[in-house]
Each structure stands twice: as structure tokens, then as C-alpha cells.
């Protein structure tokens, strides 16, 4: 883990003092020790793989896939052959925007996006599965929800710090694609301009004051959200195109996996 934090300093995500603070945080260390997904060597992969000054797009997920076969440290990306349901809806949106066929390929690793400057960051970096207890399913589900809520809470200061750094960018276009209210809220909690806070949850493209960061907000791509009437299938294709336009000749090749 120390090597990961060393790389986070080298990549411009943390200062040495900030790294020391998190490395000595007993709650973070506990979450890392409890982590069952992703592999402990991949917890910080999103930030280790992409330097701060190379970021073009930020996509915020929630927490890692519970299945360790899926999770590998990049939000929404999967190493599994079976496509996770949220990723299916992301692929459908891209196919709608570009006439591609990602939904049909069954290739789910999004590392090429990272290589092009896409930060695939979860707002909780670890998942801990409740195991080895002789309890009923409702009891297990309740315990699981409580445990994962703790993990999300513990990582929040760390992720907020990363978001704060992104929201200082003024010299190059950066797009934050925020999917779901959790992503909307954690970003807007870092914005001080009271008037701008009124744009939370808007579907229009907005630029954060005194930055060159564009926000594109829609609902979450999960089936739970989509099946309840979330507008991701209709809004996300338009947002990918708006992202392209803002980035200009530095746009992401979304269909190249």
C-alpha cells in the first residue's frame, strides 16, 4: 500500500503530508484489511494509472462490484466475461451515440479509456462481503448494507479531496460525467459558489465557476435506476457527444476498447 501512496504523490493526487494522513488513518486501514473486492493490490488503480495532469474526463461510480471477478479498481470496468448490468446500459448509450456495437462484444475492460485520460473513480474504494455467518438472508442483507455504508463513509474524505483537486483545473478542458445523485451530491458539496449550487441535478452542460471543468449530470446506469424511469438511456448519449465537443481534438475514442 505504501507503494500505491508513493505513486499517488508522483501522479499529483496527494501531497506527502496528505498521503501520511491517510496512511495513518485506522479506519481506512481497517477497510483495506476487510476488502474482498477488488483485490487489495488494485484498490487505488484508478489514481495510480492516471496522473492528475493527464485527466480529460472523470466518471464517478459508487462502490466496487461485489464480485471480485468483476472489480479491478476501475469504476464500471470489469475483467469478467459476463457484462455487469450497469455496464450494459453504458454500452447501449455509447452504441446509441456512435452506431457502435460495444453491447454485443462482451469485452468489458475499460483500461483503454484510462489510457486516453478517463478517470474511472468510485466514491468508495473497497467492498467487504459478509461471509461465514449462520444467519438468515434478511439479516445478512441488513448487515451487508451496514458494513458497506461504513466503507463508503470512511472513503468520503479521501474522494472529496481528489474531487477538490479536479475542481481547481483552469488551464485545460475537463469533463465530469456524473451518473446518479450520489455522484452529483459529492461534487456539488465541494463547490463553494452558492448560486451555482442551484445547477445540481440539471441535465444541461454547466461549467464550474473559475474552472475549465464541465459537469454533465444524469441518472445512474444501474437497472434499478433505469427500470424506475431514470433518464440515463436518453440523456447519456447526448452527454457523450457534448463531452466530445468540449474536448475538441482531445476527445476520447469511446468505442475503442
Image (spheres, rainbow, N blue to C red):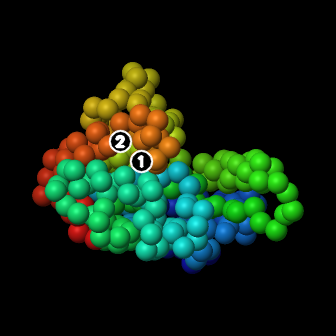
At numbered mark 2, what does the secondary structure look like: helix, strand or loop?
Answer: helix
Considering the image in quadrants, where does the C terminus appear?
Answer: bottom left
Q: Which disc number belongs to residue 112? A: none
How packed mark 1 is, by other alpha carbons closer than 10 Å (few <14, some 14-19, many 20 or more), is many
Left or right, residue 72 beside residue 152: left
Q: Say if residue 184 shows up in the picture.
A: no
Q: Is the residue 193 above or below the residue 219 in the image?
A: above
**Tally of numbered tags:** 2
The foreground one among 102 and 117 is 102
Left or right, residue 146 beside residue 82: right
The residue to which callout 1 is attached is: 221
Residue 69 picture location, percent across and down: 54, 73
Pointer 1 and pointer 2: residues touching (CB < 8 Å)?
yes
Q: Residue at x 47, y 52 (%)?
A: 61
Left or right, residue 54 beside residue 139: left
Q: Residue at x 63, y 50 (%)?
A: 152
Residue 49 picture location, percent across and down: 42, 71
Mark 1 or mark 2: which comes first in sequence?
1
The residue to which callout 2 is attached is: 232
Q: Say if residue 78 shows up in the picture.
A: yes
The foreground one among 88 and 179 is 88
Identify the image quadrant of residue 88: bottom left
Residue 245 picture location, percent across and down: 15, 47
Considering the image in quadrants, where does the N terminus appear?
Answer: bottom right
* Alpha carbon separation for disc pair 1 and 2: 6 Å
At numbered mark 1, what does the secondary structure look like: helix, strand or loop?
Answer: loop
Q: Residue at x 85, y 57 (%)?
A: 135
Amino acid at each position: 500500500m505504501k507503494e500505491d501512496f508513493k505513486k499517488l504523490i508522483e501522479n499529483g493526487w496527494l501531497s506527502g503530508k496528505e498521503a501520511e494522513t491517510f496512511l495513518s488513518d485506522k479506519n481506512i486501514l481497517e477497510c483495506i484489511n476487510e476488502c474482498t473486492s477488488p483485490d487489495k493490490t488494485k484498490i487505488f488503480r484508478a489514481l495510480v494509472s492516471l496522473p492528475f495532469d493527464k485527466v480529460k474526463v472523470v466518471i464517478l461510480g459508487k462502490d466496487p462490484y461485489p464480485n471480485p471477478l468483476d472489480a479491478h479498481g476501475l469504476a464500471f470496468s470489469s475483467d469478467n466475461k459476463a457484462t455487469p448490468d450497469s455496464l450494459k446500459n453504458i454500452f447501449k448509450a455509447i452504441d446509441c451515440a456512435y452506431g457502435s456495437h460495444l453491447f454485443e462484444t462482451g469485452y468489458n475492460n475499460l483500461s483503454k479509456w484510462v489510457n486516453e485520460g478517463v478517470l474511472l473513480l468510485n466514491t468508495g474504494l473497497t467492498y467487504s462481503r459478509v461471509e461465514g455467518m449462520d444467519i438468515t438472508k434478511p439479516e445478512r442483507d441488513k448487515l451487508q448494507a451496514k458494513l458497506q455504508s461504513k466503507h463508503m463513509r470512511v472513503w468520503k474524505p479521501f474522494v472529496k479531496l481528489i474531487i477538490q483537486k479536479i475542481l481547481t483545473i483552469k488551464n485545460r478542458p475537463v469533463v465530469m460525467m456524473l451518473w446518479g445523485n450520489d455522484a452529483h451530491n459529492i461534487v456539488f458539496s465541494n463547490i463553494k459558489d452558492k448560486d451555482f449550487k442551484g445547477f445540481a441535478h440539471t441535465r444541461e452542460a454547466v461549467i464550474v465557476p473559475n474552472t475549465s471543468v464541465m459537469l454533465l449530470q444524469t441518472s445512474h446506469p444501474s437497472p434499478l435506476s433505469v427500470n424506475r424511469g431514470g433518464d440515463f438511456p436518453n440523456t447519456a448519449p447526448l452527454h457523450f457527444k457534448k463531452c466530445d465537443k468540449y474536448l475538441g481534438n482531445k476527445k476520447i475514442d469511446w468505442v475503442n476498447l
